[in-house]
Amino acid sequence: MLTRPPRSLLGAYLGFLTAKLGFLLLLVVETGPRWLWHLGRFDAGWYLTIIQDGYQATEPGTRSNLAFFPLLPTLAGMVSSVGIPPPVALLVVAWCGSLAAVAGIWALGREVADGRVGMWMVLLWAVAPRAHVQVMGYSEGPFTALVAFCLLGVIQRRWVLAGVTGVLAALTRPSVAPLILTMGVVWLVGVVRARRRGEGWRESLVTPPLVVTLLSGFAMVSVMAFVAIHTGSPAGYFAVQAEWNQHLGTPLQTLSFFLTEVVPNPRAWPYFGIVGLFTAGYLVLFWWMVIRRERWELLVFTGLSLLLVLCQQNYYASYARFLLPLFPLWLPVARIVARRPLLPMLLVWSVIMVAGALAGTWGIQLRHSP
């Protein structure tokens, strides 16, 4: 027998769809018939090359689509095989992923608090900086959905759910590394606790968290091995990343960039300066999570993910997008907003939604990838 979905889940979907449809409407008004083209720019265009021509190794010094993980283009290719144009198929998969993320974020919020907190986590995620990529042909929506359900599985100790979604996330984006490490930390904590209870080494070590960690790690390494075979070099994946001028540094290098290249340069503020402020805001949200002593699994994941983003060099303009899957950061805000009267909070959220839609319509037309 079918049961009626909780009102908070329906509210989450209603708010998310309102925010996304509002952005799409503004985009159509602003760009006319080119709105669909804008949704397929930047990373989406590279995914389309994979759908249409497969992975291609290129000459040294040129960028290759081997930098992109395979799950999103594979699913879009399957949808395209039934006669749907590849650009539309890519959007269908990306949109379905974002809709799944709504359910995952809400479920996690309900697990650690209640349904209303879960609803507000979704609404805040829907209007977060660069949230317009949730309806572009990008992997952020599907990846966030997989992260949400994986974390839910970890917290509920439902290891089949955590394992399946962890493996799929590892096939979606390289930024899955913090999620894999989080599952590894959960395993280590379990080992320590088991030993304190007097269990043997074998019973303590060989546990479901170890299995899901190894499977997810193997999936990620398999993608890198595929690139290595395709390029004919054991370090092929890292060579491909180098062609994209992407490498890891330290948070101090990132801070130095903003202090020396952005702060003194007024021309950089309309884009890089705003991104820097958003990033600082996320750091404050993480500090707030620590102060409130949120679930330690969520703290480990968000902390490691923040560190990874801050270590990424040369793609500072995309920091806000890279931070979108870190939706647990909105948990402290959602807890407070959920205790306030609904109508005033919805009015404030609506103002933020309109501002976000206007900013997204502006940002999607720039030369920088969001």
Image: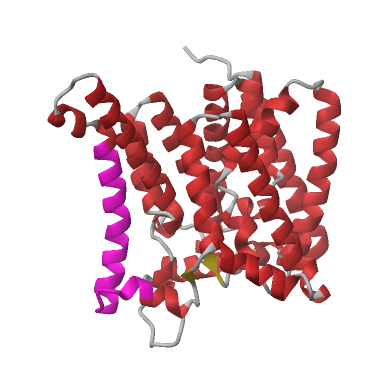
Residue 326 falls inside the magenta stretch: no
Residue 35 point in image, percent of width and height: 71, 62
Residue at image position (24%, 72%) is 229
Quadrant housing the C terminus = bottom right
Residue 196, placed above or below residue 90: above
Question: Residue furthest toward the top?
Answer: 1
The part of the image, by quadrant, that contains residue 339 is top right
Q: Position of residue 240 (x, y in %)?
A: 40, 75
Horizontal relation, residue 31 to residue 149: left or right: right
Range shown magenta:
210-238
**Which secondary structure type mostly characterizes the magenta part of the structure?**
helix
- Specify whether 334 is left or right of 223: right
Q: Could one spot residue 64 in this view of the protein?
A: no
Q: Residue at x 71, y 54 (%)?
A: 278
Residue 213 counted in the magenta span: yes
Viewer-proximal residue, 366 or 255? 255
**Residue 18 position within the rendered picture, expressed as x and y whole percent measured from the top left:** 74, 39
Number of numbered markers: 0
